[in-house]
Image: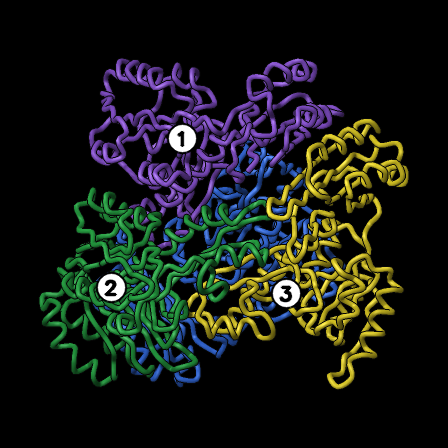
Chain colours: A purple, B blue, C green, D yellow
């Protein structure tokens, strides 16, 4: 599902910036015969942190991911790198969380059906029953986990168990209208993506379209971000907007907004799944 | 400078919505021989307020603006209308306020030079000397009115006098970096336009690009709005955004932002000058 | 499915422009008690043609659509109007034509499932079997009408029969990869919508993404237009584009293009179904 | 004027793709102490060509540009590179060609005045006198070179002489309404930028807004491209579009189009001046 769809290894790393990082990494990859299909770098001037992502043709690297991990480690250590390498032929395991609205779910499942999003979806979890049938059509298990307002903890324990059982690499809140408990956001830090239906930081919290309508803005937006303990405040992956005017009611804004939400979520999820996003403090580097 | 550039009269009105407003107004215009070049309506469902703008070919209306005012008044009264009519052949008088940055000024003066913006600019007022020469090239009077932080009142009294002398229909803050006193905003209510360098309501106040950079947003924006006593909170006329990424420093955001700022301000000013904007509470109806 | 979702009557008309049209129409509507929720006009300067669309609250018009038709006719005749009135409570009958690609189909059926697109879909017709199961999930009849290259006529006769049987108000080619015969385009003139996967008039005909790639354009686009006898040359309803760069292969352009295609088709279909589109020569007036 | 405004050397190269290019180049740069501020790569899958651009902090490279040229040559030769290195502290010499319309000129000169575009403009050449005064305000020499339709050759000889005298690195056609002779396009191949007022390949040639109006498109655009012997067919650097509707006359499209034209030209010129554009056949790689 990458720009180049041949089986590849994705190497992504960050470390304090200094002379010679690219040289050392490229030298190492070349020494193993590695053919680099795509390469992206970023030097953050403010923090002095360096970020890098290499997509390497798998067939050119006989040592494979495991061999790479072992042989690259000394170099990584010498540069104090945080790094990982992944194999695009091993689909990531993505659990979707939904409530009643299905536009993001429908969009993501379409991308999954036509293999644009080449992942495994071990299950969909919802606090409502509404979308069971549509999920069932895709032969994906659907778990109904109601979240009663007065006693939410057991529900989230159940959800944590389901995620563990599903061996989820990544959790996508596709318009899931519940705030996750801090424990869960910590356990899956940097791996839970949410779509918020406003152009953050404007209109965080509940009912953003109503707030946008009240303020009389001329554009509405959506934000895909990582979920952290603080509501709607996590690192932003992608955003987009759509024009509205005085004739648009809140209902009309919601309708138009759905199209932005699903586009932005799909892009954000894609970037994440391709290891194009690197978190840095409360910001992201996105090698799109 | 309208879509239809023939001399026209612009009738704009608002009143409580009810059956028959358009019929009555159109009937009246037709009875005077008036040829309607463009007509726009809006019914605000929430407030029950109705808005209308008609552009009437001047040559088709022998009674002229004055005759229209007199003859239309009884009808207007019977519908409790707030209304006005203007003649596109009488250029509006627009005073520009600037500080040191000249991108909005340069853009507006270019539109004025090539007659895209067909107004009179009786003068430019600035709290700095920097832009005197460029304004002088256009043969427009330039007034330097410094605003010392510890004693701003005399400066604003001077400015009020200059505006009065200029018989300003409209004041445009083309990146004027001073907060206007409440008295002035009241006197020119609905006639002072500002360009704020963020996508409001995000990042109101000072240094919005720094705040946007800190938050790690993926789009920056600009907002053209009417100035009210409360800073950056007036009715929004237009907004737009531009994509940024992790590689963009604050300086780079400022550079990119300048292009959005000048576009949004030019559009907002154009809408205002063509009587396309109607204020309603803290929101606008913009018949673009 | 209109901006205002209350049951309404949509009056749309065109006629030679002259003084008094709006007055006469509005007067007539008001005289019947009609409450106008939304009204749009356009005077085409070049051709001297006038266009108008009124959305009237159904409950305010006791004469109903039939009564309106009868009583309005003399007025319509006196202005030489081409006109129609429709009732938003009577869903239009829309037949979808597809081949193998399902992004537009999936998007439209989602909008139908969640009642954003409030129509009846009597059937889906395809020259391939691939999408039968997905359509069946929606409990919509699916007809497989193969179109053998060497003998296409019987297929199109069969299709014409299916459309007649379905009493189709409108036919949507949701990435249907066959050129329709002239007879069919004539019979359903102004009622067949296609989505072409380029920004027309660039790259008409087959394989537009390959052509766009070859030319090295920096934006790709999609065009929703009415189908006429001449391929890809009918009146354009809507268009949009998406940015691409040197790193995007043809496959990548196709992936990005799918998102533009489905958005543009959905918008075009919506405009058409709400009687917002009026055809005028080979161009459209779209009261969006 | 780069993202990073510190004095830097820009190394740009292309060569047949193979394993080890990045490693060899990065190793070389690092061995000289070079600090890479920004680095971009592209592997063209179709042609097997590799492209690379490195921005190196000047103060980190004691050998300087001349030393670099000498020492890097053997490596460049071994990879069959086409390459160059430039010093951002040496402003490029840009000659502007204009006719009567001044929106692009005004925009570019503003960017030059405020040092956003850090170049030398040895002169402006025009086939009309209209813009002399505005250019003179900037203290830039203005040459009036009329191009009589029946005898254009002497004019272009004069222009060639002026360009030679100006030691032009780059020529920008800022709405210059004359077709350049083939000889000139060859002499300055890859160094003459034009802004065409349509979204190419649609509406090439004269009067594109009229053609766009006739076809009834819903977006108008502009294209910045390198000038080649074949009119409007050179490698595209950047494009953008703006929405229009049925209410927009040709004059209105021209007005809206001016804003797209100046934005696209400014971006294209910026990319070119920062050595971000690499030509490859009739396409460009743009490391934006």
Q: Quadrant of the C terminus of chain C?
A: bottom left
The numbered disc on residue C155 is 2
Q: Residue at x 54, y 71 (%)?
A: D209
Residue B74 can be seen, yes or no: no
Distance Cα–Cα, label 3 vs label 1: 42 Å
Question: B114 or A5: nearer the eye?
Answer: A5
Residue B64 can be seen, yes or no: yes
Question: C229 or A269: nearer the eye?
Answer: C229
Report helix, strand or loop for mark 3. Answer: loop
Q: Position of residue C103 (x, y in %)?
A: 35, 47
Distance Cα–Cα, label 1 vs label 2: 39 Å
Discs 1/2, front: 2
- The image quarter containing residue A15 is top right
- Of all chains, the one bearing label 3 is D
- The image quarter containing residue C17 is bottom left
Report helix, strand or loop for mark 2. Answer: helix
Q: Position of residue C269 (x, y in %)?
A: 30, 58
- Of all chains, the one bearing label 1 is A
Left or right: residue A127 versus residue C70 is right
Left or right: residue D202 versus residue A51 is left
The numbered disc on residue A119 is 1
The numbered disc on residue D233 is 3
Residue contact at pointers 3 and 2, CB within 8 angstroms: no
Q: Residue at x 50, y 38 (%)?
A: A5
């Amino acid at each position: 599902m990458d720009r180049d769809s041949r089986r590849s290894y994705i190497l992504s790393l960050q470390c304090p910036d200094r002379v010679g990082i690219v040289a050392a990494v490229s030298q190492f990859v070349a020494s193993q015969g590695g053919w680099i299909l795509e390469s992206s770098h970023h030097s953050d001037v403010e923090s002095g942190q360096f970020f890098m992502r290499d997509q390497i043709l798998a067939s050119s690297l006989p040592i494979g991911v495991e061999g790479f991990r072992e042989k690259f480690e000394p170099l990584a250590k010498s540069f104090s790198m945080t790094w990982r390498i992944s194999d695009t032929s091993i689909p990531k395991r993505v659990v979707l969380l939904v409530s009643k609205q299905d536009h993001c779910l429908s969009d993501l499942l379409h991308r999954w059906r036509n293999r644009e999003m080449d992942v495994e979806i071990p299950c969909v979890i919802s606090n409502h029953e509404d979308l069971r049938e549509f999920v069932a059509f895709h032969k994906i298990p659907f778990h109904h986990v109601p979240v009663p307002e007065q006693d939410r903890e057991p529900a989230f324990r159940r959800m944590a168990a389901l995620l563990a059982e599903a061996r989820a690499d990544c959790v996508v809140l596709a318009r899931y209208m519940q705030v996750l408990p801090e424990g869960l956001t910590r356990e899956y830090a940097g791996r839970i993506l949410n779509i918020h239906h406003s152009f953050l930081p404007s209109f965080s919290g509940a009912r953003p379209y109503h707030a946008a309508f009240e303020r009389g803005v001329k554009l509405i937006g959506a934000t895909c971000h990582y979920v952290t303990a603080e509501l709607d405040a996590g690192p932003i992956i992608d955003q987009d907007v759509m024009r509205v005017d005085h004739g648009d009611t809140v209902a009309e804004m919601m309708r138009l907004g759905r199209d932005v939400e699903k586009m932005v979520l799909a892009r954000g999820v894609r970037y994440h799944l391709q290891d194009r996003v690197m978190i840095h403090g409360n910001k992201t580097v996105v090698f799109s």
